Amino acid sequence: MTATIEKEFREMTVAERVELIGELWERVALEPAKIPVPESHMQELERRRKLYRTNPARAIPWADAKALILKRHAKRRRAA
C-alpha cells in the first residue's frame, strides 16, 4: 500500500473503512478464479472429502446444516 493510500485509510472512520473494504471485495469477487486459495483450505477440503467418501450417510443437506448453525448461534447470542 502506498503511503498516501495508507494515510487516507487511517484518516477514515471505522464505518468508512468497512464500507471501502466491502466495495473492494465486491470488485475482487468479480474474478473468483483469480482469488488465491490457501493450501490449508485445500487440505481441509480434501480431509472433508475423504470423510464423506468414508461415510456419506453422515452428511446432511445444506439447509439442515444452516438451520443447525443458526440455532447454535442464536443460543450463544442469548447466553452472552
Image (spheres, rainbow, N blue to C red):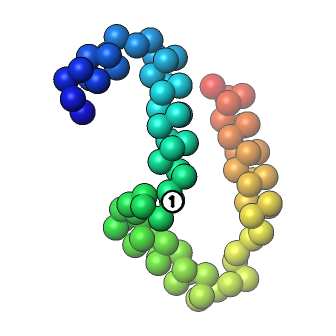
> x, y percentage for residue 20?
48, 27
Residue furthest to the left: 3
In the image, what residue occupies the spot 80% across and 60% down? Answer: 63
Up-down relation of residue 24 to residue 6 (above or below): below
Q: Position of residue 55 (x, y in %)?
A: 64, 86
Left or right, 68 with respect to 80, comes to right
How many callouts does the rendering have? Answer: 1
Q: Nearer the viewer, residue 13 or 61?
A: 13
- Up-down relation of residue 35 to residue 77 (above or below): below
Closer-to-camera residue (78/39): 39
Q: Amino acid at mark 1?
A: Pro
Answer above or below: position of 37 versus 74.
below
32 displayed left or right of 38: right
What residue lies at 68% left-to-right and 84% top-to-bottom?
A: 56
Which residue occupies 75% across, 64% down? 62
Figure quadrant of residue 57: bottom right
Q: Which residue is mark 1?
A: 32
Q: Quadrant of the C terminus?
A: top right
Residue drawn at (76%, 45%), measured in percent from left and top? Answer: 71
| Circle 1 crowding by C-alpha within 10 Å: few under 14, some 14–19, many from 20 | few
Label 1 sits on a secondary structure element that is helix
Q: Is residue 65 above or below residue 57?
A: above
Residue 8, position in %: x, y? 32, 16
